[in-house]
Amino acid sequence: MNYWLMKSEADVYSIDDLARDGSTMWDGVRNYQARNHMKNMKKGDIVLYYHSRQKPSAVTGIARVVRESYPDPTQFDPDNKYFDPKSSEDDPRWWLVDVEFVRKFDDPVGLPDVKAEKGLAEMVLVKNSRLSVQPVRKAEFEQVLKMAGEPPL
DNA sequence: GCCAACGTTGGC
DNA sequence: GCCAACGTTGGC
């Protein structure tokens, strides 16, 4: 089983929205690296849920992959903001997964805390702040859980 | 709200 | 195939 981190802006789709909906399509990713990570996700993989562009940005909970990659339907819809005229149903360019709610942290782990933690210095989140879907090492996942004061999964 | 870092596009 | 121009992300 693998671990990942996925970013969302809290006012666009927060961990509370995911808790309410139960599960969601992770649509709208238009970055090849992020897409490739989603293509590699397996059912049951665990996801750290991260809120970006807020004060402070923070890991706010945990989600789980419930459906492995399939074409992002928004790329084919001309009325959708994520429409991609260069993509086709025969050869889709963008793929996504479905994730389900697992847990919301009572005490989110803020980015400054992540950066201050020596054991997390190699996290993609610290090294490349722009990637919206990124791999996480098992030890990193466990460290973040510990910092949140959360019991193991 | 600013702007640095990064990714993509397109002219040549 | 290079690289300047442009657009977007996201920390601050």
Image (tube, coloured by chain):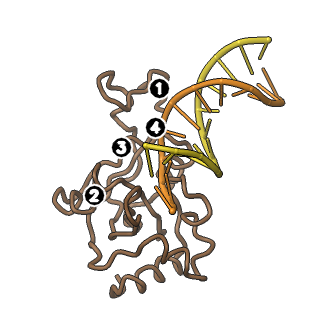
Chain colours: A brown, B yellow, C orange
For the C terminus of chain A, give its image quadrant: bottom left
**Secondary structure state at the residue bearing disc 1:** loop
- Determine which residue is flagged by label 1: A87
- In space, the residues marked 1 and 2 are separated at their CA atoms by 28 Å
Residue A103 in the image: state x and y as whole percent: 27, 73
> Label 4 is placed on what type of residue?
Trp
- In space, the residues marked 2 and 3 are separated at their CA atoms by 14 Å
Q: In this view, does A95 lie to the left or right of A25?
A: right
Q: Which of marks 1 and 4 is nearer the N terminus?
A: 1
Q: Residues within 10 Å of mark 4 (few under 14, many from 20)?
A: many
Badge 1 vs badge 4, beta-carbon distance below 8 Å: yes
- Determine which residue is flagged by label 3: A27
Image point (59%, 82%), residue name: A119
Q: Earlier in the sequence, mark 4 or mark 3?
A: 3
> Label 2 is placed on what type of residue?
Ser
Q: Which chain carries label 1?
A: A
Q: Work out whether disc 1 and disc 3 sit on a shared chain.
A: yes
Q: Mark 4 lies on which chain?
A: A
The disc placed on residue A14 is 2
- Determine which residue is flagged by label 4: A94
- In space, the residues marked 1 and 3 are separated at their CA atoms by 15 Å
- In space, the residues marked 2 and 4 are separated at their CA atoms by 22 Å
Instruction: Name above or below for residue C6 compared with residue A55.
Output: above
Q: Earlier in the sequence, mark 2 or mark 4?
A: 2
Badge 1 vs badge 2, beta-carbon distance below 8 Å: no
Residue A83 in the image: state x and y as whole percent: 38, 27
> Label 1 is placed on what type of residue?
Ser
Q: In this view, does A20 lie to the left or right of A9?
A: left
